[in-house]
Amino acid sequence: NTLIDNVDKRTGRIFGPPSGKKLRVFIDDLSMPKVDIYGTQQPLALLKFVVERGYMYERGGELGKIELKDVEWLAAMNPPGSGRNPIDPRVVSLYAALNINFPDEANIRKIYDSI
């Protein structure tokens, strides 16, 4: 599914979820796009554009502007390494970033022993 498949036309060039609702877009593996020869990750550059500006352009045809309303963006990623790349700090700045480490074996035992 694409983003456009999940929004309705409101008025003019404004699109969004049905009235009174919010659309949450979840992007998994944010660190997966390959870094090109210029040091950028094109999918993340497009994502940054859409999130920052709140609009995008139609594909094909007249390339009309599509304004997005009531859309929230969520993303997840693992740390760089093993095929994952560091991402542009400008993309990270668009999100409230949290880091959760996997618990060590002693903590896992304590959790499961208490069940």
Image (spheres, helix red, strand yellow):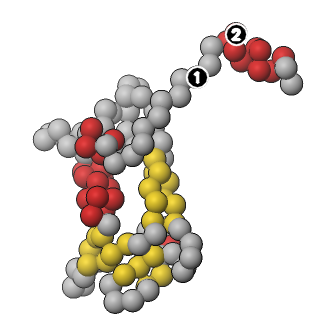
Percent coordinates x, y for residue 39 in the rendering: 17, 38
**Left or right: 20 in relation to 34:** right
- Indicate the amino acid at tag 2: Ala
Find disc 2 in the rendering and name its residue: 106
Q: In this view, does 32 lie above or below 73?
A: above
> Mark 1 and mark 2 in contact (Cβ < 8 Å)?
no
Along the line of sight, the residue nearer the viewer: 56 or 31: 56
Position of residue 103 in the picture relative to residue 98 (left or right): right
Residue at 43% of width from left, 85% of height from top?
9
Badge 1 amino acid: Phe
Q: Which residue is tagged 1?
A: 102
Q: Can residue 2 be seen in this view?
A: no
| Residue 77 percent location from the top left of the image | 45, 38
Q: Which residue lies furthest to the front in this view?
A: 20
Name which residue lies at 52% across and 66% down: 23
> Is 3 left or right of 64, judged from the image as shown?
right
Total tally of numbered discs in the picture: 2
Is 61 placed above or below 23 here? Answer: below
Q: In which quarter of the image is residue 88?
A: top left
User: Residue 19 at x, y = what percent?
Assistant: 54, 80
Which quadrant holds the C terminus? top right
Tell which residue pokes out farthest to the top in this image.
106
Q: Check disc 1: other Cα within 10 Å, few if <14, some if 14-19, many if 20+.
A: few
In the structure shown, which secondary structural element does the residue marked by tag 1 occupy?
Answer: loop
> Where residue 114 sits in the image (x, y, percent)?
85, 20
Tell me what residue is drawn at x 77 percent, y 15 percent: 110
Disc 2/disc 1 C-alpha distance (Å): 12 Å
Does any portion of residue 85 appear in the rendered image?
yes
Q: In this view, does 35 lie above or below 22?
A: above
Q: Which residue is drawn at 54% across and 23% down?
A: 101
